[in-house]
Image (cartoon, rainbow, N blue to C red):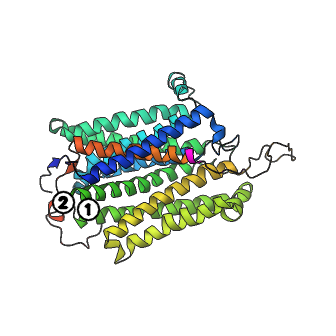
Amino acid sequence: MKSIRYTEIEGRSTGYYGLLAVLGFLVVAGLGAAYYMEHNGHWVTGMNNQIVWGMPHVFAVFLIVAASGALNVASISSVFGRTLYKPLAPLSALLAMMLLVGGLAILVLDLGRPDRLIVAMTFFNFKSIFAWNIFLYNGFLLIVGVYLWMMMDRRMNRYAKPVGFFAFLWRLILTTGTGSIFGFLVARQAYDTALLAPMFIIMSFAYGLAIFLLVLMASYRWTGRPLGDLVVLRLKNLLGVFVAAVLYFVVVYHITNLYTAKDIGFERFMLLDGGMYTQVFWWVQVVLGSIVPLVLIYHPTWGKSWASIAVASVLVVVGGLGQMYVTIIGGQAYPMEMFPDKEVVSSAFFDGQIVDYVPSLPEFLLGIGGFAMALIAVALAVKILRFLPARLDDQMADPHYQGADAKA
């Protein structure tokens, strides 16, 4: 690969200021929603005593998982030595940090009492996976920040590979911890499985890469910088592998539950009788989020179109949010079995009932606001610092490139 020159974007166009205005409005709307919920109490949301993790958690966990996957491009260059991805490593690390910040901002603002976070940061119960995640999330920001320094300071470039390898291991641990939040909840039949940890890892690869592709294509298209098909098609093919892997894990997860007698009721609820949850699972998660993107990615004609790749990436993001909705909210909506293998004991407190949950507008605004916070931070960062190569056409990326049909 030829020498890559990194430059800031000018950021003086009407489109750029319009983008900042839209994202800024969404951030303010999210902050307003957080204030409204904090001032009036969570009774103004759709959450209740059974659904304690609502739509804000869907957005927050999605962003946290995607943050780990967004670092994948940098990891491929540093850990696996693929020089094609090296020019994209700074943008990959930046996006990873900002997505995590956006996700954590949603979590903090959804606490009802954000000041209670001080307790979580000063008193640790290490039997709780949440205490572990305090260190995992902060450690991720610190390590990736150092990784960015190693990459962007020429004097420190020789340390980029070992630090990148450490960041790669840390992000695997972080996503394992996020998946374990649910896997360790033995009281919920939707959770209580070690399969969720590796499943969250592969989900992070798909969601993070989809967002990275969208940011990359938008950054170069809107700034008029040359970006060749080689890089885009390589990343597109990699995205297809990750989407297929996520679909495989989903199939294995449900087959495993169907094999276990105690989980048959939950599987019937999720796959057949769950109403909105069943519809979101089949149509949003499976069809729109997996099957349609795979068709767009691997179709001999559509798979070479940037528009199709962008649509596939957007659908992966939408499918990922659907998967989080089904996992987090659907898992809480299904009634807990209070006394397994014992005589039926019931009360008037919603025992054995599917819980109704209708997300409120403030919940959506808070979640979208966290998303906007991450994106506006990236938009400002690429204007201030040199995160983007000035050009990344096919000849610059690979002098031996023979055409647009090369495979990853």
Seen at 28% across and 51% down, the residue is 16
Extent of the magenta region: 355-362
Q: Quadrant of residue 219?
A: bottom left
Asked if residue 262 is positioned above or below residue 272 in the image, the reply reads: above
Q: Residue 36, which numbered label?
A: none
Is residue 307 left or right of 44 when viewed as pictured? left
Q: Quadrant of the C terminus?
A: bottom left
Seen at 22% across and 56% down, the residue is 223
Name the kind of residue labelled 2 in the image. Answer: Ala
Q: Secondary structure at mark 2?
A: helix
Q: Quadrant of residue 293?
A: bottom left
Q: Do the residues under discs 1 and 2 have CB atoms within 8 angstroms?
A: yes
Horizontal and vertical percent position of residue 401: 18, 68
Q: Is residue 232 magenta?
A: no
Q: Is residue 14 visible?
A: yes
Name the residue nearer the viewer: 286 or 254.
Answer: 286
Q: Quadrant of residue 315?
A: bottom left
Q: How would you rate the neighbour count of disc 1 (Cα within 10 Å): few for under 14, some for 14-19, many for 20 or more?
A: many
Q: Secondary structure at mark 1?
A: helix
Seen at 40% across and 50% down, the residue is 69
Horizontal and vertical percent position of residue 191: 63, 48
Pointer 2: what residue? 397
Give the main secondary structure, helix, strand or loop, of the magenta stretch: loop
Asked if residue 126 is positioned above or below residue 369 in the image, the reply reads: above
Pointer 1: what residue? 231
